[in-house]
Image (spheres, rainbow, N blue to C red):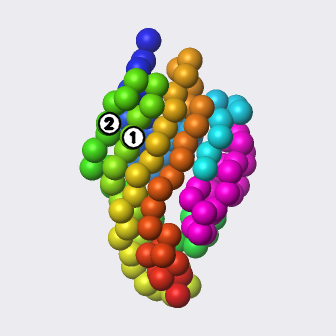
Amino acid sequence: MRTAYDIIKAHYDASTRGDLDGMLADLAPDATWIEMEGSLCAGTYVGRDAVVENVFKVIGAEFDQFGFTLERLLDAGDDVVAIGGYHGRHRRSGKSFKVRTAHLWTVQGDMIRRFEQFTDTQRLAEAEG
């Protein structure tokens, strides 16, 4: 049986490859995904379709070369914390950005049940122009 750490590590490995299906392969059908208030994708979304529509499609439309660089992955049993940062360039403004970010994941029964993002939304807003 895979651990929560293994499941989240696989998510970031898929992210590095640019593999959205791989990133969301272990997302439970009723998973809760929380994007920080003040961010472009702010809100709470339930399920894969809502996450794709309200997060990943928006990011793809608004940013070039958007990515997350993982620095540390901390194992806390069913919870996993990722520390790193977003980087990219806003399409409309042309402004590049780097911003520190933390992700809190909860895994139960081999499925991702919850994701919550913590980031400097002011830095992201500055890139938007």
Q: CA distance from mark 1 to mark 2?
A: 5 Å
Q: Residue at x 71, y 33 (%)?
A: 30
* Residue annotated with mark 2: 74
Residue 71 percent location from the top left of the image: 27, 49
Residue 47 percent location from the top left of the image: 70, 40
Q: Answer few, some or many: residues within 10 Å of disc 1's Cα (few below 14, many 20 plus, some between 14 and 19).
A: some
Specify the label residue 81 is tagged with: 1
Amino acid on which disc 1 is placed: Val
Q: Secondary structure at mark 1?
A: strand
Is 89 drawn above or below residue 100 in the view shown? Answer: below
Q: Residue at x 44, y 12 (%)?
A: 1
Q: Nearer the viewer, residue 1 or 125?
A: 125
Residue 74 percent location from the top left of the image: 32, 36
Magenta region includes residue 95: no
Residue 116 percent location from the top left of the image: 54, 47
- The reply to whether discs 1 and 2 touch (Cβ–Cβ < 8 Å) is yes
Left or right of 124? Residue 87 is left
Q: Secondary structure at mark 2?
A: strand
Amino acid on which disc 2 is placed: Leu
Q: Which residue range is magenta in the image?
A: 35-55
Q: Is residue 90 in sight in this rendering?
A: no
Q: Residue at x 41, y 34 (%)?
A: 80
Left or right of 25? Residue 45 is right
Left or right of 71? Residue 18 is right
Left or right of 76? Residue 110 is right
Q: Which of the marked residues, 1 or 2, is nearer the chain's N terminus? A: 2
Q: Residue at x 45, y 61 (%)?
A: 119
